[in-house]
Each structure stands twice: as C-alpha cells, then as structure tokens.
Image (cartoon, rainbow, N blue to C red):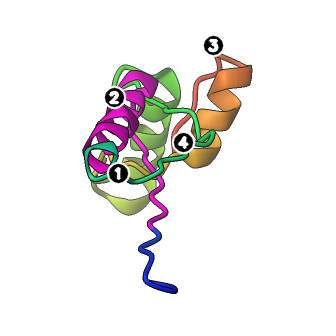
Amino acid sequence: VEQGRFHLCALVRSLHDSAAQAMAERFQALFGLMGARVKVENGYPGWAPNPDSPLLATFKARHAALMGHEPEVKVIHAGLECGILGSKYPHLDMIS
C-alpha cells in the first residue's frame, strides 16, 4: 500500500498458456469490479511435460542404474526455461 493505493503484481503461470490467460482474465474481471486498473503484461509460456518422453525414460534408466532406484518424478509449475525453449523449438524433447 502506497499513498492509499494498493498495488498487486502477480506472475500467473501454468502448464498451459490457455489456463494462464484464463486466470489473468479472472484477475481483470475481479479487480475491475472493484474499480481497479488492471494491466496484464506478457508472461512466460507454459510447458506441459511429456510423461512418454524418450529423454525422461533415458534419465530414469540411468538414474536407476547409478543410484539403485528410480527417481521420483514430479510435475511442478517451475519450467520457465523449458517454456521459453519449447515456444521456439516445439519438437524439442526436454525434462527439467
């Protein structure tokens, strides 16, 4: 809060660009109802991991061979670099 004004900056992220866009539109609608000015700027592209990725299969096999067990693989929303690279090279196989 500065000079009686509330300022909110939100980084909307998702595995899918359409979901991030929908969330940004919800922010605009909600805060617009309160008379707020909402500015939406370019964010980071989404990146949906591929569970059938050959690279992931190779990684899991090598990890199991070296460590004696398969790695725990999780999907999280932090693939910023993969989203950027994937938007430029859509057929690139990536894991993060």
Figure check: 1 above or below 65: below
Q: Residue at x 36, y 20 (%)?
A: 52
Q: Earlier in the sequence, mark 4 or mark 2?
A: 2
Q: Which mark is residue 35?
A: 1
Q: Which residues are magenta?
A: 8-31
Tell me the SS state at disc 4.
loop
Q: Residue at x 34, y 26 (%)?
A: 51
Q: Which residue is mark 3?
A: 91
Tell me the SS state at disc 2.
helix
Q: Earlier in the sequence, mark 4 or mark 1?
A: 1
Q: Which residue is mark 4?
A: 40
The nearer-to-camera label among 2 and 1 is: 1
Q: How many residues crowd around disc 2 within 10 Å: few (fewer than 14), some, or many (20 or more)?
A: few
Name the spot of residue 91 as percent of width and height, x first: 63, 13
Residue flagged by tag 1: what amino acid is it? Answer: Gly
Residue flagged by tag 2: what amino acid is it? Answer: Ala
